[in-house]
Amino acid sequence: MYSVPISAINKNGLIEIFETLAQFPNVMMIKNGDYTVDAHSLIGVFSLDINKPLEIILDEAPDMEFMNAVSKFIPAQQVS
């Protein structure tokens, strides 16, 4: 299992994350503290608390196309 830390500033940021992840058919979840939702569920994504850390959970290692797409959501201190 692989994880990618992300963040959203507001609900519009959650919409942007949802729309970006919708471009990838991979099975993925978003973990928010002890709460985990389907990354392709709009209601699930809207239920996330943006004040807590978010992370995308993937079954397979993310490819470069995926990482480029989500790079704008990765907190600055996490980018290497």
Image (spheres, rainbow, N blue to C red):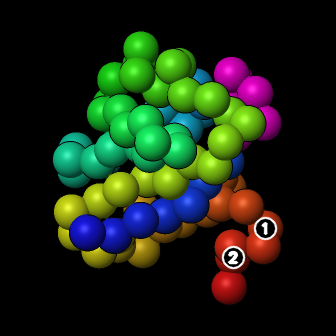
Give the residues drawn in magenta, as a range.
Answer: 8-13
Is residue 10 within the magenta segment?
A: yes
Q: Which residue is mark 2?
A: 79
Q: Is residue 63 left or right of residue 77?
A: left
x then y, percent, for residue 47:
51, 19
Please give the name of the residue rendered at 67% of the width and 42% of the height, measured from the top-left corner.
Answer: 52
Q: Which mark is residue 38?
A: none
The picture quadrant where one finds residue 39 is top left
Pointers 1 and 2 in contact (C-beta within 8 Å): yes
x then y, percent, for residue 32:
51, 42
Residue type at numbered disc 2: Val
Examine the rendered structure and indicate whether residue 64 appears above or below residue 14.
below
Please give the name of the residue rendered at 47% of the width and 26% of the height, measured from the top-left corner.
Answer: 45
Examine the rendered structure and indicate whether residue 16 appears above or below residue 24.
above
x then y, percent, for residue 74:
65, 60
Residue type at numbered disc 1: Ala
Mark 2 is surrounded, within 10 Å at the Cα level, by few (under 14), some (14 to 19) or many (20 or more) other residues, namely few
Examine the rendered structure and indicate whether residue 44 appears above or below residue 76.
above
Q: Secondary structure at mark 2?
A: loop
Please give the name of the residue rendered at 29% of the width and 48% of the height, measured from the top-left corner.
Answer: 28
x then y, percent, for residue 8:
70, 39
Q: Which residue is mark 1?
A: 76
Q: Quadrant of the N terminus?
A: bottom left
